[in-house]
Image (cartoon, rainbow, N blue to C red):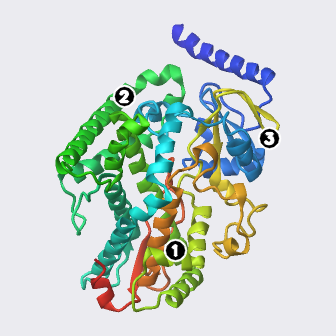
Amino acid sequence: MALVLLPMSMIFIFLAYKLYNKLRFKLPPGPYPLPIIGNLCAMGAVKSRCFFEWSQVYGPIMSVWFGSNLHIVVSNPELAKQVLKDNDEQLANRYKNWTHSRLSRNGKGLIWADYGPHYSKLRKVCVLELFSTKSLETYRHIREDEVRAMVKSIFKDCTNPCDYGRGLVVKKYVGAVAFNNITRLLFGQRFGNEDGVLNKLGAEFVASLSKKAERGAFFAIVQEIWWLRWVLWPQRIGLAKILADEDQLKRAIMEEHMQGSQGQGEKKHFLAALLSLQEKHDLTQDNIGALLWGMVSAGMDTIAISAEWAMAELIKNPTVQWKAQEELDRVIGLDRTVTEADISNLPYLKCVAKEALRLHPPTPLMLPHRANANVKIGGYDIPKGTAVHVNVWAIGRDPKVWQDPYRFRPERFIETKEHGFGFLPFGAGRRMCPAAQVGTTLVTLMLAHLLHSFAWSSPASPEGLQPKEIDMSESPGLVCYMRIPLIAVPRLRLHQHLYKHML
């Protein structure tokens, strides 16, 4: 009897809660939720696409129920402006589900912290000390070193007689740049040799990140239903083990830094800079660890994702690739390699990077905001505690903002300089990514080298007639890599001695 009464009681509570909200608040329309599970079973794996399709039915602002938790999704620039600017302060908190709350240690770092003194302190350190214009220039040599190493690695692999003419997995090379750049930037060292073989600390570092990313992508209906979360005890044990291993790795990196930096007072990387700023900004060791680890995951994903999607679009659109290479040849020529100083003279290439970010934002739904007060968006009530998502993926395809939105056409950024809240790859307002300029610069530099050094095409189909069609679908998760990693064939464009002297 009790087994029958329990689900019936839960259904009754859910329906009563829904009726209460309907009478008290004017909520946006949306798909009808089932008792207990809400809309969870109807959601597609790639939520940005699913919400985009639903917005065609229910409008640009929707109510979506994750179990009994209300989520609001907005899908046009006008509503995005209301979320990210007009009501920025009331919506600046961060919504964390059961898994993300534990992985982020309840928001100790910058990315998952709620808006308040702690968040403001960490953001101030990032903006003024780590990602300033001066800092961008200070660490330029790291970006240039790693991008040149990428070109040299591609040259070595594509000229190997055993692999000549075979496709290369692009993610391998752009991912190596992202990883080596971020580890040198944060810790002042590479965790692997020139051939990509990781040392012991590097192997532990990659394993820690992989486990955390895997757990972060974990999505189970039960974590959205509070009275069923007891079944997640194996997941709870696994998360505790990951965090314990992460703490041990942090201590090892910190100890290695302290042993290797005795007598040195130079701020050669972010860890050294943050340790020297502890008193000035009242930073604890936990603050520093959480800040650096957040940068690792965010920086690696954003850069690798953006570069891979851009290359996929350039291979699918050979005319655009040719135009970018024509600009590179005209500005740089074929007798030297690209430097970061050249980027300012490559307006079309910069537009290529922007167009890739428009169609393929690294975090297509942004990270979710949470209302810290009752607010109104688009004439509808947003109750306190509600999660709010901005569907950047959908906004980048809004025909009211972008003419012929599904076409990859970088020229649109030359024709129109300002797109306001129609272009939000790094967010806006109080939660905007503080490293947006660093990330954009590195991605553009990578594209410059990849296009200047090589001509790219798809590998031939098994029949050997037509190039293989590129699968442009996304993997599920907070960040969206290509579901099937891009495989491409590079062809040399420069004199061979330039590749051999890259480093």
Q: Quadrant of the C terminus?
A: bottom left
The residue located at (25%, 82%) in the rendering is: 160
The crowding category of the residue bearing disc 1, from other C-alpha atoms within 10 Å (few below 14, some 14 to 19, many at least 20), is: few
In-image side of 75 versus 291 (left or right):
right
Q: Which residue is mark 3?
A: 378
**Camera-side residue of 154 and 252:** 252
Horizontally, residue 128 falls left or right of residue 385, namely left
Along the line of sight, the residue nearer the viewer: 13 or 182: 182
Q: Compared to 231, does 148 lie above or below?
A: below
- The quadrant of the rendering that contains the N terminus is top right
Q: What residue sits right under mark 2 in the picture?
A: 236
- Above or below for 6 versus 164: above
Of the numbered discs 2 and 1, the one sitting upstream in the chain is 2
Please state which of the two labelled residues, at mark 1 or mark 3, is closer to the viewer: 3
x then y, percent, for residue 41: 59, 37
Amino acid type shown at disc 2? Arg
Q: Position of residue 437 (x, y in %)?
A: 52, 60
Q: Earlier in the sequence, mark 1 or mark 3?
A: 3
Quarter of the figure with residue 287? top left
Q: Which mark is residue 469?
A: 1
Which kind of residue does numbered mark 3 sit on?
Gly
The mark lying in front, picked from 3 and 2, is 3
Q: What residue is at 19 percent from the left and 47 percent from the top?
A: 256
Q: Helix, strand, or loop for circle 2?
A: helix
Left or right side of 184 for 20? right
Could you tell whether 144 is left or right of 353 in the image? Answer: left
Rounded to the nearest angstrom, the CA distance separating label 2 from label 1 is 42 Å
